[in-house]
Image: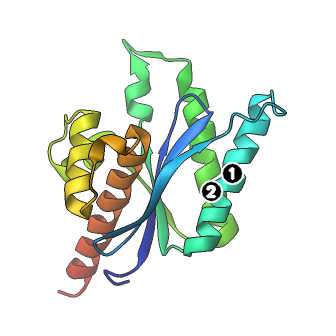
Amino acid sequence: MNEEEVYIGIDPSVSRKKCGYAVIQGDKCLAYGVFVAAAKELHYEHGRLYLLKRALARLIKQYKPASIAYEDSFQQLYKNGQRIHNADKLRLMQAIVICNAFDHGIPYRWYTATQVKKAVGKGNASKPYVRRMVCAIFGIDKPSSMPLDASDALAVAYCHQQAMLASMVGASR
């Protein structure tokens, strides 16, 4: 493991129709965006999930990451001890990430929203703050043009990269 390895960060959307992604290598952001599965011919949610799975598989094949990370917001999907309906939708999106990792033989890891936000600043940061911070870290001009789902995914990738580098330093001691 070295600092020039490629990492993919994923921010699964509760809507199941989109998913933020980012690809980083060292201090460079190689790609970012939002997978959107809104094909008119696929009216069923499972068809949309399949499209998202294929899009992520293409990204993995193109960039050959050392590992992939996603944000696990499951803890935030409970209110007053009751599960919010969207928890099941989020788990399906996370399953797509995990299945793709297994399909391509790469490790995966998840981080809480607080861990991701702390990696770029503060644990209770707003989405616009996270976007400003990751754009500053990676030298991206015009932060307002970056979709918030993509900036969240970039923060996940950065959080993962920092965790991998820290584990590498800890292992060398």
Visible residue check, residue 92: yes
Q: Residue furthest right?
A: 41
Give the color scheme: rainbow, by chain, secondary structure or one colour: rainbow
Q: In front here: 55 or 68?
A: 55
State which quarter of the image contains the C terminus. Answer: bottom left
- Above or below, 157 against 18 in this view is below
Q: In front here: 31 or 73?
A: 31
Q: For this view, does 30 lie left or right of residue 165?
A: right
Quarter of the image holding residue 61? bottom right
Q: Residue at x 67, y 47 (%)?
A: 52
Q: Residue at x 73, y 46 (%)?
A: 51
User: Secondary structure under badge 1?
Assistant: helix
Q: In front here: 10 or 58?
A: 58
Q: For this view, does 100 lie left or right of residue 120?
A: right
- Above or below, 65 against 136 in this view is below
| Label 1, residues with CA under 10 Å away: few <14, some 14-19, many ≥20 | some
Q: Callout 1, which amino acid?
A: Lys
Percent coordinates x, y for residue 124 in the rendering? 19, 34
Quarter of the image holding residue 57? bottom right
- Above or below, 85 against 142 in this view is above
Visible residue check, residue 9: no
State which quarter of the image contains the N terminus. Answer: bottom left
Label 1 with label 2: CB-CB less than 8 Å: yes
Percent coordinates x, y for residue 97 in the rendering? 59, 53
Give the numbered dot on residue 53. Answer: 1
Q: Callout 2, which amino acid?
A: Leu
Q: Residue at x 62, y 33 (%)?
A: 17
Q: Residue at x 67, y 39 (%)?
A: 37
Q: For this view, does 123 lie left or right of residue 69?
A: left
Percent coordinates x, y for residue 132 in the rendering? 22, 46
Q: Which residue is mark 2?
A: 56
